[in-house]
């Protein structure tokens, strides 16, 4: 009687070892790798100096993320890109700047004046609008509305050398009440600077909600590479008055609230026509219970009926909701209740 032994050898025993990264290689070892590839790689045309340099630039840009990018000419702003202002008096006032641009100051001053007249105790400053070209002198104009005169707001420098300092100046309008900042990954570098300054100088008056920002607060340089392509990269750091460096220092909210980007963009777009109030109200939804089934008001039941009948019926659709703004107003309401005099 013969026995046949079968050895089952796993497939991975013959597989190529997993590739390692180049992180642990020295400069000399990297140069040796390039030299060997240039000399002996089977497809020489794929490793021309041009292709190698392109790959190196692509790798650097991928590593640096938003802090170094190849960009094309920015499209012009559409008329819809204007600051959003809304009063939730007497609870709060809401302002969403586009890019802390100097032309927005008039609407901001008017909003502060109206909010004060309405008796609003809290300003909700929504910093979730993306803008990649901050003018820090313009950001200072907004900070003038919050900080005392001659306050060192921030400074720009590099390698321990200060290039420019930004101190506040008198402003026609000011805000002395509570402030709630809304931030997320779309918060622009200029908005990050404003947020950091308000949090630093107005501790106790500022509450931050949302999700962490990208930490891209820096001065950016732009170098033209062709007629339509430019290299944009962080070239100088920003510092608070106490020397805190803001580059790669995200604004971390005290209360974490996530809103899907598509929902936020939808709210921003639709609120231009109908305001923000419809997006912060909870609408009671029918529940799957006996009463709903008998009355025929349950949305699942209505959907089944519609599928079986040609007669159209209204189906309950969940509306867009800005949970971040909704929670901000809830906190403003709590603050107002806690400060109200007791009977």
Image (tube, rainbow, N blue to C red):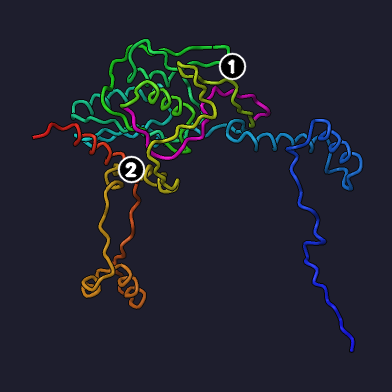
Badge 2: residue crowd in 10 Å (few <14, some 14–19, many ≥20): some
Assign a secondary structure to mark 2: helix
The location of residue 75, given as percent across then percent down, is 52, 34
192 left or right of 65? left
Position above or below: 308 against 116? below
Which residue lies under the disc numbered 1?
158
Q: Quadrant of residue 89?
A: top left
Percent across and percent down for residue 7 are 82, 73
Dot 2 corresponds to which residue? 271
Disc 1 crowd rating (10 Å Cα; few below 14, some 14-19, many 20+) is: few
Which quadrant would the N terminus be assigned to in this image?
A: bottom right
| Res. 334 image quadrant | top left
* Magenta stretch holds residue 96: no
Q: Which residues are magenta?
A: 205-227
Q: Nearer the viewer, residue 253 or 106?
A: 253
Query: Outermost residue, front direction?
Result: 1
């Amino acid at each position: 009687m013969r026995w046949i032994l079968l050895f089952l050898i796993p497939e991975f025993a013959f597989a190529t070892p997993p590739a390692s990264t180049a992180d642990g290689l020295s400069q000399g070892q990297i140069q040796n790798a390039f030299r060997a590839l240039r000399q002996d790689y089977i497809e020489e045309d794929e490793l021309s100096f041009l292709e190698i340099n392109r790959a190196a630039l692509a790798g650097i840009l991928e590593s640096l993320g938003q802090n170094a990018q190849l960009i094309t000419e920015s499209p012009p702003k559409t008329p819809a890109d204007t600051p959003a202002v809304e009063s939730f008096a007497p609870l709060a006032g809401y302002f969403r700047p586009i890019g802390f641009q100097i032309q927005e100051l008039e609407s901001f001053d008017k909003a502060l004046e109206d909010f004060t007249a309405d008796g609003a105790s809290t300003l909700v400053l929504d910093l979730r609008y993306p803008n990649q070209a901050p003018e820090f002198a313009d950001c200072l104009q907004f900070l003038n509305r919050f900080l005392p005169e001659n306050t060192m707001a921030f400074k720009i420098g590099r390698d321990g050398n200060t290039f420019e300092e930004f101190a506040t100046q008198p402003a026609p309008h000011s805000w002395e009440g509570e402030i709630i900042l809304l931030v997320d990954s779309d918060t622009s570098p200029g908005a990050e600077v404003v947020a950091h300054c308000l949090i630093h100088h107005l501790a106790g008056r500022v509450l931050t909600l949302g999700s962490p920002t990208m930490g891209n607060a820096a001065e950016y340089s732009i170098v033209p590479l062709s007629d339509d392509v430019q290299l944009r990269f962080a070239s100088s750091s920003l510092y608070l008055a106490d020397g805190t460096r803001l580059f790669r220092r995200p604004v971390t909210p005290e209360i974490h609230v996530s809103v899907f980007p598509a929902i936020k963009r939808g709210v921003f777009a639709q609120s231009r026509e109908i305001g923000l109030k419809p997006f912060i109200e909870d609408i009671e939804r029918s529940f799957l219970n006996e009463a709903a089934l008998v009355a025929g008001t349950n949305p699942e039941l209505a959907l089944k009926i519609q599928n079986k009948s040609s007669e159209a019926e209204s189906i309950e659709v969940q509306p867009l909701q800005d949970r971040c703004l909704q929670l901000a107003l809830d906190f403003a309401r709590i603050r107002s209740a806690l400060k109200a005099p007791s009977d």
